C-alpha cells in the first residue's frame, strides 16, 4: 500500500497526512481522484495543474491541498488506485485455490477493466514508458513483493502438479500485457476490427479467447462460464 505523505522537510510545522488505499470514504477525495485521473490522462503529469484538477472536480483548490500538498503525491495516489483496481483479484489467492478458476477470473476481469477504464491503463502506460519517474519506489517496495508472493503460490500449484511448469513471473507479465493491450491500443484494435467502440459481447469474446490461450499453455482448462452453466441446466 502506498502512503502519500506531505513533504515534511519543506513544511516542518505541518503534520504529515496520509492517503490510504482502499479506505476512501470522503466524497471530496473521490471527486479529486476522478478529476485528477482525467487531467493527467489528457495533459500528462507536467501539463496538469492542481487548479485545473480542482476546477474539474468542482471544488476549491484549497480542498485539493488539504489532501495532497504536492501534485506528485496526488499523481501517485491516482496510479496506486489504478493498480489496486487491476490486481485486487489476485490479492488473496491461496495454494488451495483452483488455478484455472483464479487465472480465468483474473484474465476476464482485466479485459473488462480495459473496456470500462481504458484511460487508467493509458495513464499507467505513459508513466512506465517514461521510466516510471514517480512509481520507481512503489514498484520496488510494493509491486515487487506483491508479484513475488503470487509467484510463490503459482510455483506451489506447479509443484503440486496442478499446472505445467512455466515461469510464474512471465505468466503474470503475459496476462498483464495481453489484457491491457485492448486499452492501450484501443484505437488500433477498433480500427482494424472496423468497430466504433467496444461492445459487451466483444469483451466476453476477448476474455474467453485470452483465457483459453493462456490457460491451455499451462495445462489448464478454462472453467465453463456461469452463464453457460445456467443456460444448459
Image (cartoon, rainbow, N blue to C red):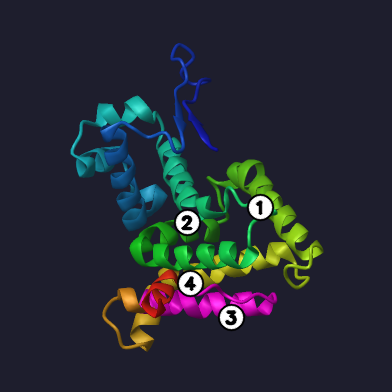
Checking the image for residue 12, the label placed there is: none
In x, y percent, where is residue 75?
42, 43
Viewed as shown, does residue 35 lie left or right of 118?
Answer: left
Cα–Cα span, label 4 and label 3? 15 Å
Q: Earlier in the sequence, mark 4 or mark 3?
A: 4
**Front position among marks 4 and 3:** 3
Q: Earlier in the sequence, mark 1 or mark 2?
A: 2
Helix, strand or loop at mark 2: helix
Taking 2 as reference, is 193 above or below it? Answer: below
In x, y percent, where is residue 181?
48, 72
Viewed as shown, does residue 19 lie left or right of 141?
Answer: left
Q: Earlier in the sequence, mark 4 or mark 2?
A: 2
Checking the image for residue 124, the label placed there is: 2
Quadrant showing the N terminus: top right
Let me know if residue 204 is in the magenta part.
Answer: yes
Cα–Cα span, label 4 and label 1? 20 Å
Q: Residues within 10 Å of mark 3 (few under 14, many from 20)?
A: few
**Front position among marks 1 and 2:** 1
Helix, strand or loop at mark 1: helix
**Front position among marks 4 and 1:** 1
**Front position among marks 1 and 3:** 3
Q: Earlier in the sequence, mark 1 or mark 3?
A: 1
Q: Residues within 10 Å of mark 1 (few under 14, many from 20)?
A: some
Specify start and end residues of the magenta stretch as a single range: 202-224
Q: Residue at x 44, y 60 (%)?
A: 121
Q: In this view of the protein, which residue sits in the foreground, 94 or 89?
A: 94
Cα–Cα span, label 1 and label 3? 22 Å
Cα–Cα span, label 1 and label 2? 17 Å
Judging by the rendered image, the residue that carries numbered circle 3 is 213
Judging by the rendered image, the residue that carries numbered circle 4 is 181
Q: In this view of the protein, which residue sits in the foreground, 1 or 106?
A: 106
Amino acid at each position: 500500500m502506498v502512503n502519500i505523505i506531505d513533504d515534511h522537510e519543506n513544511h516542518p510545522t505541518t503534520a504529515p497526512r496520509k492517503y490510504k488505499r482502499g479506505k476512501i470514504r470522503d466524497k471530496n477525495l473521490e471527486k479529486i481522484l476522478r478529476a485528477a485521473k482525467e487531467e493527467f490522462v489528457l495533459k500528462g503529469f507536467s501539463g496538469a495543474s492542481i487548479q485545473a484538477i480542482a476546477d474539474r472536480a468542482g471544488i476549491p483548490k484549497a480542498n485539493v491541498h488539504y489532501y495532497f500538498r504536492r501534485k506528485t503525491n496526488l499523481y501517485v495516489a491516482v496510479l496506486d488506485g489504478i493498480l489496486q483496481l487491476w490486481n485486487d483479484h489476485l490479492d488473496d489467492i491461496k495454494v488451495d485455490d483452483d488455478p484455472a478458476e483464479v487465472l480465468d477470473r483474473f484474465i476476464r476481469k482485466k479485459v473488462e477493466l480495459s473496456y470500462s477504464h481504458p484511460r487508467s491503463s493509458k495513464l499507467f502506460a505513459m508513466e512506465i514508458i517514461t521510466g516510471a519517474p514517480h512509481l520507481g519506489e512503489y514498484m520496488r517496495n510494493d509491486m515487487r513483493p506483491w508479484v513475488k508472493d503470487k509467484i510463490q503460490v503459482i510455483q506451489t500449484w506447479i509443484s503440486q502438479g496442478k499446472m505445467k511448469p512455466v515461469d510464474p513471473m512471465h505468466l503474470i507479465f503475459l496476462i498483464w500485457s495481453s489484457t491491457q493491450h485492448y486499452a492501450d491500443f484501443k484505437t488500433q484494435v477498433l480500427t482494424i476490427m472496423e468497430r466504433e467502440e467496444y461492445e459487451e459481447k466483444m469483451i466476453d469474446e476477448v476474455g474467453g479467447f485470452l483465457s483459453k490461450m493462456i490457460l491451455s499453455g499451462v495445462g489448464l482448462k478454462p472453467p465453463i462460464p456461469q452463464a453457460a452453466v445456467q443456460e444448459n441446466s
